[in-house]
Image (cartoon, rainbow, N blue to C red):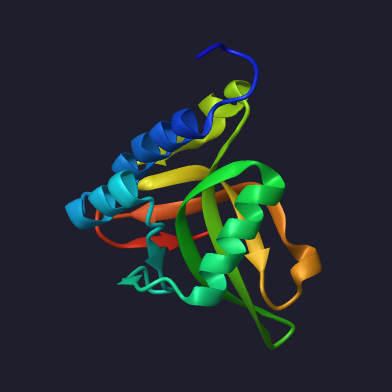
Amino acid sequence: MSDYGKLSDQEMREEAVKCLCLLSRDNDVLFAFARQGEVPYFDEKGLKQDLPEEIASEIKNVEKEKGVKIYVALKTVFIKESDPMETYAFLCISDYAEDLPYNIRSISPGVYAVESYVFNKTIPGWSELGTVIVQSDGFRLVRIR
């Protein structure tokens, strides 16, 4: 792998596994992603749940359109002007080698800045690539910012 240029799908998957290993100690989650490519899904309380079909479909669309490898989906509900806003942070790996140092950064024990695509289900036009802050105890994973 060079320092610049496009990553192959296999290289992106290997990087995703490395990042997932930092966030989870749940062997079922790790093996399911590493072996079958199953994206783990955590609800707003940080609990592992089955990935809803609608979100699985959106993940495939985002991977194709944005050229990223998604390795975790986190649901978050925000309140904006008294209305709930449903979002999903798709933690992802960019297909550019030069982005590798920015995929995941430790801020403090159990707290990470992670590259993601945030899908805004309530207002799809507000969906965007960026960085989210997540907290993990090794089994539960939540977006905190």
Say if residue 130 shows up in the picture: yes
Task: Decide: is 26 above or below 54.
Answer: above
Which of the 4 image quadrants contains residue 99?
A: top right
Front one among 51 and 35: 35
In the figure, is residue 110 to the left or right of 117?
Answer: left
User: Residue 23 at x, y = what percent?
Assistant: 33, 47
In the figure, is residue 44 to the left or right of 83?
Answer: left
User: Residue 70 at x, y = what percent?
Assistant: 51, 49
Say if residue 24 shows up in the picture: no
The residue located at (65%, 58%) in the rendering is 61
Task: Decide: is 122 above or below 119.
Answer: below
Front one among 136 and 7: 7
Which of the 4 image quadrants contains residue 29?
A: bottom left
Task: Decide: is 106 above or below 41.
Answer: above
The residue located at (33%, 54%) in the rendering is 136
Q: How many marks?
A: 0
User: Residue 116 at x, y = what percent?
Assistant: 58, 49
Front one among 44 and 71: 71
Q: Quadrant of the C terminus?
A: bottom right
Query: Looking at this rendering, what residue extends furthest in the left direction?
Result: 27
Query: Looking at this rendering, what residue extends furthest in the right direction?
Result: 125
User: Residue 41 at x, y = what percent?
Assistant: 40, 65
Task: Decide: is 143 above or below 93.
Answer: below
The residue located at (61%, 70%) in the rendering is 87
Query: Looking at this rendering, what residue extends furthest in the bottom direction?
Result: 82
